[in-house]
Amino acid sequence: MKKHFDAAGKTASHKFSAIPEKFFARHRQLVAIQVGSDMDVTIPVRARKYKSQTVDYTIFTATGKIIKQGRIFKSGKISFFAAAGKLYFVKVAGYCGYFMNLKNVPSACYTRGNRIYRKMGKGFHFFGGRTPIPMYFFVPGGTKEFSLELKSNVPGETAILKVHNPDGKQVAELKTVTLQTDARTIKSGSGAGKVWKLELCRARKGVLDDAFVYLGKGLSGWLSFDPGNMLIMQPVEK
């Protein structure tokens, strides 16, 4: 299996210090992990009380070698030994919503369908949680503009996505209140080569349930929930 992604390492080029809040993902997600020193990685997982409460996972290397597979019922931990500098992927799948605590784990989550995870849908799939839900992404150096997309099943399921530049200033707001999809192109300005912040929030009408955040053109498609342990990813091939 060819490598499709590589890690450029963590970045210190940001002013954000917030820790990740509690949120629920849903269905299929792909998480990349790379540690700076040999360590045992542990990711607590808790399934939301919604129909099936099982969460399946597979841990594999960048070349596709499977290290571990397992199933969590209601709550448990995804754990494995990670060698320094080596890139690992964790595929997670659950019909129910599930909370992954990625605090203190150098990681990034993918927001696009891809050859590693063919059945993964477009966008990181949120299934509610405490709002606002902060997340962080890196804008590559030299990028003049990039695109973001927010989607939900309106009018019952709605959401707002606030975009903050590296200085913390809100520069855009995406809404799915009357329209199912809101896509925006944003100028990078002096923010290229730096970390930006998103906040997923509840709208005044509807509920935050099944909302999708997609990082599009000009971006790698990866986002992180812990700015102190943000893993910058880059594609190896298109």
Image: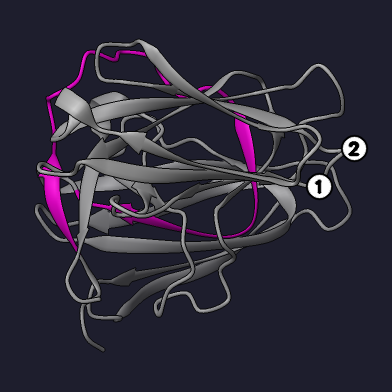
**Looking at the image, which residue is at 77% across and 34% down?**
158
Classify 10 Å Cα crowding around label 2: few (below 14), some (14-19), many (20 and above): few
SS under mark 1 = loop
**Looking at the image, which residue is at 48% across and 71% down?**
69
Find the magenta span and give its range.
Answer: 6-34
Q: Position of residue 179 (x, y in %)?
A: 76, 42
Which amino acid type is shown beneath numbered disc 1? Answer: Asn
Q: Nearer the viewer, residue 61 or 227?
A: 227
Q: Position of residue 220 (x, y in %)?
A: 29, 54
Q: Report if residue 72 is visible in the image.
A: yes
Question: Left or right of 98: which side holds 33?
Answer: left
Q: Nearer the viewer, residue 230 or 215?
A: 215
Per the image, the residue denoted by label 1 is 153
Q: Is residue 25 magenta?
A: yes
- Classify 81 as above or below 64: above
Q: Report if residue 211 is visible in the image.
A: no
- Classify 100 as above or below 233: above
Q: Quadrant of the N terminus?
A: bottom left
Q: Nearer the viewer, residue 44 or 107?
A: 107
Spatial CA distance of label 1 from label 2 is 7 Å
Q: Quadrant of the C terminus?
A: bottom left
Q: Which mark is residue 156?
A: 2
Tell me which corner region of the image, top left, top right, bottom left or bottom right, holds residue 107: top left
Q: Position of residue 23 (x, y in %)?
A: 61, 32
Question: Left or right of 223: which side holds 134?
Answer: right
Tell me which corner region of the image, top left, top right, bottom left or bottom right, holds residue 49: top right
Which amino acid type is shown beneath numbered disc 2? Answer: Gly
Question: Left or right of 228: which side holds 94?
Answer: right
The reply to whether discs 1 and 2 touch (Cβ–Cβ < 8 Å) is: yes
**Looking at the image, which residue is at 25% across and 38% down?**
138
SS under mark 2 = loop
